[in-house]
Amino acid sequence: MPDTILRAMSQPHGSPPGTRAGLVVAVDGPASSGKSTVGSGVAEALGYRFVDTGLLYRGVTWLAQQLRTPLDVGESVAELAPRVSLRAGPEGRYESVLVDGMDVTDEVLSPGVDRRVSEVARHPEVRSALLGRQRELAEGGDIVVAGRDIGTVVLPHADVKVFLDASPEERARRRAEQRGFAPDSPEATAILGDLRRRDEIDRTRATAPLRPAPDALRVATDGHGLEETIDLVADAVRAERDRRAGASVEPEPAVEPEPAVEPEPAVEPEPAVEPEPTAKTKRAPVARTSPRRESTAEPRLSDRITPFMQLSDLVGRTIMNATTRVHIEGLERPLDIEGPLLVVSNHASNADGPLLVCWLTPALGRRMHLLGKQEAMDRPLLGWALAQNGVIGVRRGAADLEAFRAAKRVLDEGHVLGAFPEGTRSPDGCLQPAKDGAAILALRTGAPILPVGLSGTHRFWPRGKRLFRPGGQVRMRVGTPFTLPRTSGGDRRRAQAEATRLIMTKIAELLPPSQRGVYAAEVDRVRGE
Ligand code: DC
């Protein structure tokens, strides 16, 4: 590859943070992962411009085909790049492709271009020729830029990076459905084959291959709805905007649920269906009205306490009772709570999950769902035991989204969910600032919240230790269920932050003063009123 190209491509262009007026949002992902739909939906929600950079590669491909330029000669194809441009509509969406000023949008979306564009996009000369153009479009910010290498190469300083993904089968299924083909038709099979081939080329090309930026928010869109992915990404952008504006707003929510396994933080919910071209039509219509929801085909969750759970709880209680003094308060009477329930607790130890589950399950008379790392669920014996205990596996990478979705589903179906709002174990047993995940879940589902304070667990099984230390005592204080006050309109983030503070104060009240940490003053304030 010529030196100049290498240099041009390795320079970390895209203005560094702080030198732009508005934010730049990079949305990358494979074909039919929902980039244009989600990207343009987010742009619309935020009043940003939107550009799908794939259109540039398509324009060059189409022109090369018209001129019979050999597609395998990068330099020749790259020479055509200056003749291709994008034109924005009144809403700031660059949705028209011009070649020498002539509108060829429909042509570049044709299956003929579909089939060959990856071959063109793999040439470093072509990528280099289009690089400056893409960066110019992003200048000034307030733009969502969709593509394959936006977060990694084109705009490495993008303020928010998102990587959308879905299995090839799911993407092919969507595309076939959009084009009106039955799932098992030869056309659907051909679409899957074509997608796989294009993925392979995009992912393995030497220059700017398709891959997530390390700092990208990864969103798996299998089986999810469009509106929620748009909300998720738009919220991430708003949080970043608030952060930059110096507002003291939490970035993104996290829920940490789960027992002995170290769980995953959770953000928000649900992604995308890609509508898109019927053979050759409009690209990425912004389906703002009643988007098609994927049928998830997931069986409904159960809240039955199985004999295995009873046995596990008994074993857990026996081990803990034999190794430390366990004080339980607030379970003198059965917890007669029906419907969804969000159990929230402080988190300082690996003992917290088992403590909650082993004592609360019999008291509630139904199972408590916790989220666990999929890696743990994949381990032969442990995974089986966790699954038998109602733990729901959440894959890493897409964990934030998946965890939130899984957690919300538990509550939507009327079950009990356990969550640690701090998102991770406290190193010293004192409350740390919590994320908004638990509050968002409660606000969105209206579920009652049961606060629990766990004290002494950080000494029984300190963070960083492989095993617990027999001796000492642990205490679990179960509080009174409460619901969050209803909010209507107003600043959503502020409402979430308020709700988080309320939840954490309720937990702090159940802890000894030495463990109330950053919420100690709040307890004093509430008690002083
Ligand atoms: O998103 P799309 O299907 O319209 O993209 C067309 C092709 O362009 C696809 O093969 C990947 C390539 N592309 C790229 O390599 N880099 C980009 N930033 C955008 C698209």
Image: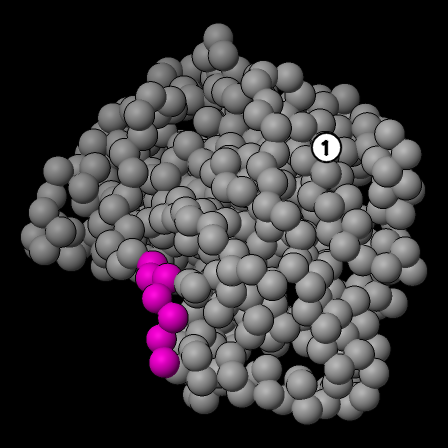
Quarter of the image where one finds residue 384? bottom left
Q: Is residue 331 magenta?
A: no
Q: Is residue 305 magenta?
A: yes
Q: Which residues are magenta?
A: 301-307
Quarter of the image where one finds residue 280? top left
Q: Badge 1: few (under 14), some or many (20 or more) residues near its Cα, within 10 Å?
A: some
Q: Quadrant of the C terminus?
A: top right
Can residue 322 be seen in this snapshot? Answer: yes
User: Is 402 positioned to the left or the right of 19 in the image?
Assistant: left
Furthest residue in direction front, as rendered: 333
Numbered disc 1: secondary structure: helix
Residue underneath mark 1: 498
Q: Position of residue 318 (x, y in %)?
A: 60, 88
Can residue 3 be seen in this snapshot? Answer: no
Residue at x 76% of width, y 74% of height = 474
Q: Position of residue 16 (x, y in %)?
A: 80, 38
The way the protein has been coloured in the rendering is: one colour
